[in-house]
Image: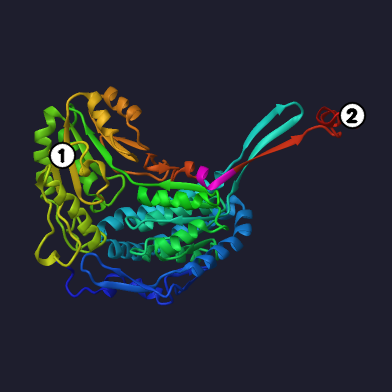
């Protein structure tokens, strides 16, 4: 059931802030110039929340120009000055936490308790981390490595960063894209997904209200084909940072190559959940359900492939299915809701297609259907457990991006680790065992950017996030992300007080 008498305006009173448009350029909201509109839809009800003018190439040009104009002064600011503004930014977002939480729930279908307790606090923590990290962008002393010369390394910002964020975590993805870039002295043009622009716009407005100069953070809300590709190919954009599917990431890389841009890609995932026969079964079952259903499974690090050693396999399937059946689907704004809808009806239908095709070669243990009754208007899909699929089947190899967990058995440790590595992806994984030697081997041999032990899904600002293989390259969060958003310069001094004629004679001979 939905909140009695609730309307989109009741759910998101801050919507009136976007009356002037959904493009945030040089510190103000404007309307897009593409000549086409797009509606933000509440996926829980199918109701339109906000209709806006999409960005066209002219808007991208204006945003890049604003970022380029703001870059010299922002790059020249001291780390302390940038840090102070980022601390203010964190305070402004904290003051508006409820607006952010409600907007994120409304546009994505996330339970409000999740956005209040996870998405918004995580974003504020991320800002606070980069406020501190901005003061530690040190170069490196290299000393005297060549005779009478002293060398050192400068770390410098790159310039205008063009970033593209997905719809599954629009607020956190805006933070992951914007914060390390501006903390390092760059300026940013971010294109959020057209389905979910609201919190990115609130985020940019909060940055401006905190005192971050106009043009440092810009938002263009348009389609990937028009606004996104124009941003990636823009000659004044020095770097592209993209999070999304591997297929689209390949297209982004192709366009960026034409202008030899710095490129950061965080792409798809198909995270294995490896359960050895000595694991704590209760913990593993609870971890599998939480890890598979986080954000309705629309998470590239979600647990999607559970490999369970043969002695535990049958009971794991039985208990995981039983726990999934207790998960409460409902209105994202209702306190008792565990799981909201998928982001759109199109995404729900895509997920349902994977499950329906799997019925021909596997067993749907639970779920595999859309709920009826009060939830029938929304993009809901029941938590689904599939067993009996082959390793090379579609549901094991392809990213479904929904509340679907596939369970397969394995016999030996060697086989389990080999199966965990047997997809094109390598973003995240987890291993469950009481044996430190088994888990230590898993951390060494599983090819993924993150391997959790006896847990699945937590992330922290201080540690990096990024993938191996077809999951992309480069890191979000942590001090490691500065490697993406800075370039290094070797500086060398001649320590002598005289012109080194002997060096010239060596190169050119006597003159």
Report how far apart the C-alphas of labels 1 and 2 lie in the structure.
Answer: 78 Å
Q: How is the image coloured?
A: rainbow
Q: Quadrant of the C terminus?
A: top right
Q: Which residue is mark 2?
A: 510
- Residue 480, horizontal then vertical, whole percent: 48, 41
- In the picture, measured across the screen, residue 441 lies left or right of residue 296, that is right
Name above or below for residue 102 compared with residue 174. Answer: below
- Residue 308, horizontal then vertical, whole percent: 17, 32
Please tell me in which quadrant of the rendered image residue 8 appears.
bottom left
Label 2: element kind: loop
Q: Nearer the viewer, residue 282 or 418?
A: 418
Q: Which residues are magenta?
A: 482-487
Please tell me in which quadrant of the rendered image residue 284 appears.
top left
Q: Is residue 340 visible?
A: no
Q: Is residue 108 magenta?
A: no
Q: Is residue 485 magenta?
A: yes
Mark 1 and 2 residues: CB-CB less than 8 Å, in contact?
no
Name above or below for residue 72 compared with residue 498. Answer: below
**Predominant SS of the magenta segment:** helix
Q: Is residue 501 visible?
A: yes
Neighbours of disc 1 within 10 Å: few (<14), some (14-19), many (20+): many
- In the picture, measured across the screen, residue 504 lies left or right of residue 143, that is right
Residue displayed at 12% across by 42% down: 362
Label 1: element kind: loop
Residue displayed at 15% across by 49% down: 357
- Residue 251, horizontal then vertical, whole percent: 42, 52
Q: Which residue is mark 1?
A: 389
Residue displayed at 33% across by 28% down: 445
């Amino acid at each position: 059931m939905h909140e009695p008498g609730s309307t989109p305006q009741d759910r998101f009173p801050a919507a009136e802030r976007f009356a002037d448009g959904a493009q945030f350029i040089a510190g103000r909201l404007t309307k897009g110039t593409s000549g086409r509109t797009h509606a933000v839809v509440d996926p829980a009800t199918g109701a339109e929340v906000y209709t806006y003018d999409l960005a066209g190439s002219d808007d991208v040009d204006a945003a890049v120009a604003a970022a380029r104009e703001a870059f010299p002064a922002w790059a020249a600011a001291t780390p302390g000055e940038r840090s102070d503004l980022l601390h203010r930014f964190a305070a402004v977002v904290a003051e508006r936490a409820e607006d952010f939480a409600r907007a994120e729930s409304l546009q994505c279908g996330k339970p409000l308790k999740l956005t209040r307790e996870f998405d918004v606090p995580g974003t504020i923590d991320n800002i606070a981390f980069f406020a501190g990290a901005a003061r530690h962008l040190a170069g490196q002393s290299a000393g005297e490595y060549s005779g009478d010369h002293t060398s050192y390394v400068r770390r410098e910002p790159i310039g205008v960063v063009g970033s593209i964020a997905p719809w599954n975590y629009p607020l956190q993805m805006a933070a992951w894209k914007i914060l390390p870039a501006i903390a390092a002295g760059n300026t940013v043009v971010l294109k959020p997904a057209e389905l979910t622009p609201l919190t990115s716009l609130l985020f940019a407005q909060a940055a401006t209200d905190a005192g971050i100069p106009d043009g440092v953070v810009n938002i263009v809300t348009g389609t990937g084909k028009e606004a996104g590709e124009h941003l990636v190919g823009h000659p004044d954009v020095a770097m592209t940072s993209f999070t999304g599917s591997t297929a689209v990431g390949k297209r982004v890389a192709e366009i960026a190559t034409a202008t030899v841009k710095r490129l950061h890609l965080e792409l798809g995932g198909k995270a294995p959940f490896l359960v050895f026969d000595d694991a704590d079964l209760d913990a593993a079952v609870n971890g599998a359900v939480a890890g598979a259903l986080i954000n309705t499974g629309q998470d590239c690090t979600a647990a999607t492939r559970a490999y369970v050693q043969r002695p535990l396999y049958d009971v794991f399937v039985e208990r995981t299915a039983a726990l999934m059946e207790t998960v409460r689907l409902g209105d994202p704004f209702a306190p008792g809701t565990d799981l909201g809808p998928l982001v759109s009806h199109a995404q729900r239908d895509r997920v349902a297609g994977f499950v329906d095709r799997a019925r021909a070669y596997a067993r749907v243990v639970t779920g595999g259907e859309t709920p009826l009754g009060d939830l029938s208007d929304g993009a809901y899909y029941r938590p689904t457990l599939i067993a009996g699929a082959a390793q090379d089947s579609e549901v094991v190899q392809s990213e479904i991006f929904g509340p679907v967990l596939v369970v397969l058995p394995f016999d030996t440790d060697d086989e389990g680790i080999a199966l965990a590595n047997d997809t094109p992806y390598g973003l995240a994984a987890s291993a469950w065992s009481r044996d430190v030697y088994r888990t230590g081997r898993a951390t060494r041999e599983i090819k993924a950017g993150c391997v959790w032990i006896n847990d699945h899904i937590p992330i922290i600002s201080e540690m990096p996030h990024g993938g191996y293989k077809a999951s992309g390259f480069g890191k979000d969060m942590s001090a490691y992300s500065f490697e993406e958003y800075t370039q290094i310069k070797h500086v060398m001094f001649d320590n002598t007080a005289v012109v080194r004629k002997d060096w010239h004679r060596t190169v050119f001979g006597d003159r």
